[in-house]
């Protein structure tokens, strides 16, 4: 038992409110960490199924763009690469 | 309908497997974005309830440490601050 | 003048050493911020010269890889895109 | 020698301009990496001189704030910690 138990407000602080806020954030951060691990697991699964992980990451970014924009960037990438002798 | 429909494997690529992997990652990333927004909302709620958001962030970090370690770092912070005339 | 002036060590803290460390870090962080701004300026210049900035970023990443690896990833990206009907 | 040598503009691309832009960015990124390593070295030096590295990081953040604001956040941190029984 600590000094603030049964004291709804201390020094202008609503103790229960603060505790609720902190615990909700911690719970959501826990879930977020869980999701990040799930995503990592899927990439590991993709890798062991023989897929190229950096290319899958690019696919996922590209699916948020318009197909025509992806196509144009591919073309430009090739032009720039050849221009630089890569 | 695209060229790979009804073709379970093309150029060594298991099309369905790739599609499943990409869609699962996208779903989890969507959830992750949702959680990030939920956390942001709680901080906004904390702010409008009169709490100091950067201090709540520090509280959440500190709750992952041992109390004695938090205490020691507070003491050192004060010593260093005074040493530097802050 | 603060309480630690002319006191080379206070509470086990070598005041001058601490001050030197902190000031060196601050100076380097200042330089780092300057470089980040310089890089941003070059990208802005590239954009106004008509170049595609995200593609230049990819070029810079690709130049750290082996050409054969870049080539293979381009090929895989096309295969995956077609497989997914993008 | 590559296909673009002696060709100042190819497919609307000013080859020399592109090369200059890419090389300037690479040089600045190299310098930035050097600075990041220098900063890491100073933290390592601070650690071996007996300083607490996370506390030095906080000091450096705090020096960008007003002293009164730092003071107020320290006070609130203590109030919140006690409220939560930490």
Image (cartoon, coloured by chain):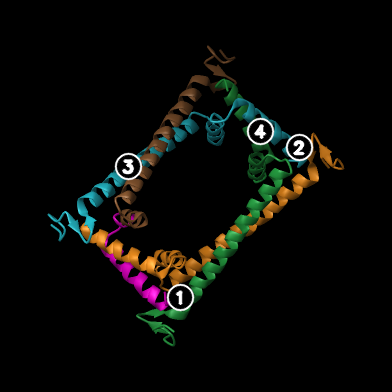
Chain colours: A green, B orange, C cyan, D brown
Helix, strand or loop for disc 2: helix
Q: Are marks 3 and 4 on the same chain?
A: yes
Which portion, as a residue range, is magenta?
Answer: D61-86
Task: Identify the mark at residue A18; answer none if there is no mark.
Answer: 1
Image coordinates for residue A41, horizontal then vertical, percent:
66, 52
Q: Which residue is mark 3?
A: C28
Location of residue D71 with respect to D4 vertically, above or below: below
Location of residue B36 with respect to C50 vertically, above or below: below
Q: Which residue is mark 2?
A: C82
Viewer can see residue C14: yes
Mark 3 vs 2, N-terminal side = 3
Helix, strand or loop for disc 4: helix
Q: Are marks 3 and 2 on the same chain?
A: yes
- Local packing at callout 3 (Cα closer than 10 Å; few below 14, some 14-19, many 20+) is some
State the residue in front, A77 or D39: D39
Closer mark to the observer between disc 1 and disc 2: 1
**Residue D50 occupies which quadrant of the picture?**
bottom left
Magenta region's main secondary structure?
helix
Q: Chain of mark 2?
A: C
Q: Residue at x 58, y 59 (%)?
A: A33
Closer mark to the observer between disc 1 and disc 4: 4
Q: Which residue is mark 4?
A: C73
Quadrant holding the N terminus of chain A = bottom left
State the residue in front, D40 or D83: D40
Q: Are marks 1 and 4 on the same chain?
A: no
The CA distance from mark 1 to mark 4 is 50 Å
Q: What count of labels does the image hold?
A: 4
Closer mark to the observer between disc 1 and disc 3: 3
The CA distance from mark 1 to mark 2 is 52 Å
């Amino acid at each position: 038992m600590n000094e603030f138990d049964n004291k709804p407000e201390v020094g202008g602080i609503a103790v229960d409110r603060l505790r609720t806020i902190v615990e909700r954030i911690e719970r959501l951060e826990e879930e977020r960490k869980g999701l990040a691990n799930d995503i990592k697991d899927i990439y590991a699964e993709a890798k062991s199924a023989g897929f190229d992980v950096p290319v899958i990451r690019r696919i996922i970014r590209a699916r948020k763009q318009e197909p025509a924009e992806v196509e144009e960037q591919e073309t430009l990438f090739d032009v720039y690469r050849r221009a630089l002798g890569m």
